[in-house]
Image (cartoon, rainbow, N blue to C red):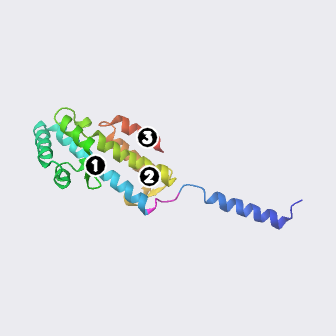
Amino acid sequence: MVPRPLLAAAVVVALLGAAGCGAPDALESDDDRALAAAREGLDDALDTEETIRTSREMARALRARVERAGDDADAVGRAVPSLVDDGEIDPEALSDFVRYAATDAPRALLIPARREVEAIVDVIDDSGADGDTEVPHARDQPLSRFVDEVERDIREVWPSLSQELEEAL
């Protein structure tokens, strides 16, 4: 028979351990910044996609600016921010943009959009967050609402990426 004080101590330890194993109440600052940056990157990709989809003239003009910029990451980033990642030109994204800007707007920005969706999924996976975890930069809204809004915004343009976000939580 286990003495009562030892049994009570074991119960307290078990309860304290279980309380620390759940999802965080709010994202840590690094994770919150990563989500904010990914959302901003997706917004850039969406804005550019809409611009080139709705105006062939703008599509040709942006493609020409990107081509003239060559390997100048600052100039490329001013023309199409989504083509630059951490201060470096993403060569695959650049190639797809030049190839598809005037003919297939969603395809032209798919690589940068995928990069940002993967960043969001990585934060969710690595942080242990769940749908109720608060996102500080998004006015402390629950992560589920944040993901729903992002998913809704990209659904028509990049349905496969939208599906990845749906499955992330």
Q: Nearer the viewer, mark 1 or mark 2?
A: 2
Disc 1 or 3, which lies upstream in sequence? 1
Disc 1 or 2, which lies upstream in sequence? 1
Q: Amino acid at mark 2?
A: Val
Q: List the residue tagged with mark 2.
A: 123
In the rendered image, which quarter is residue 91 located in?
top left
Give the number of the disc on residue 166.
3
The reply to whether the magenta stretch includes residue 33 is: no
- Residue range in magenta is 24-28
Q: Main secondary structure of the magenta part?
A: loop
Residue projecting furthest to the front: 71
Q: In the image, is residue 15 above or below residue 111?
A: below
- Horizontal side of 17 relative to 25 (left or right) equals right
Residue at the spot x=75%, y=61% of the render? 11
Residue at the spot x=34%, y=51% of the render? 38
- Horizontal side of 54 relative to 146 (left or right) equals left
Give the number of the disc on residue 43.
1
